[in-house]
Image (spheres, rainbow, N blue to C red):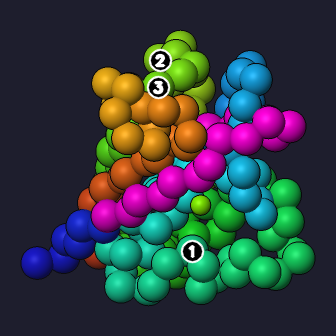
Amino acid sequence: MNLRVGHGYDVHRLVEGRPLILGGVTIDHPLGLDGHSDADVLVHAVMDALLGGLALGDIGRYFPPDDPRWGGANSLVLLQQVAALVRERGWRVVNVDTVLVAERPRLQPHVPAMAANMATRLGISPDHVGVKATTNEKLGPEGREEGISCSAVVLLVHAPEDSHAP
Ligand code: MG
């Protein structure tokens, strides 16, 4: 079977004085996600899903948080690098699906832009990138607005003939 599934999860703390960036979209909100890079929890979950599908470890292995090169990094650029790594190994992304868990702000209006940003970096159509946003019904850390989490799954197909495609 030339198919692989990958699963990723990430969470970042909400703090003052940081921009809120999800799927490469800067969202107007008094709190933003804390982290070494831009802390884009959605893109991080997708990257871990891609790497996990090929048993290549996690993003900490490729972009260590103590490496100054990734300070404030645009996670979409890192996603593009992970997508290239997947392609170099002869695999192609079929589709991505994600669930963002955030009590506030309302993310729905930003979903199409998030999907489009990631689709561009992955070299697939935006209608193959699912982004869903849910609250946590005020339960747990996401519900208390202490952080935002995200899980992602990807399907990969072995397609070595496409390995040099953009
Ligand atoms: Mg992260």
> Which residue in the protein does label 1 denote?
59
- The spot of residue 114 in percent (x, y) is 56, 33
- The residue lying at 73 percent from left, 41 percent from top is 15
Mark 1 surroundings: few (<14), some (14-19) or many (≥20) residues within 10 A: many
Instruction: Say which residue appears at 32% left-offset and 58% top-offset.
Output: 154
Q: Is residue 5 left or right of residue 57?
A: left
Q: Does the residue labelled 1 lie within 8 Å of ligand 1?
A: yes
Amino acid on which the number 3 mark rests in the picture: Glu
Q: Residue 121 carries which label?
A: none
Provide the major secondary structure of the magenta segment.
strand
Left or right of residue 57, residue 117 in this image = right
Q: Is residue 115 visible?
A: no
Above or below, 29 relative to 3: above
- Residue 108's label in the rendered image is 2
Quadrant of the image where one finds ligand 1:
bottom right
Tell me the residue at 31%/64% (across/down). Answer: 7
**29, above or below 98, in the image:** above
Q: Is residue 144 visible?
A: yes
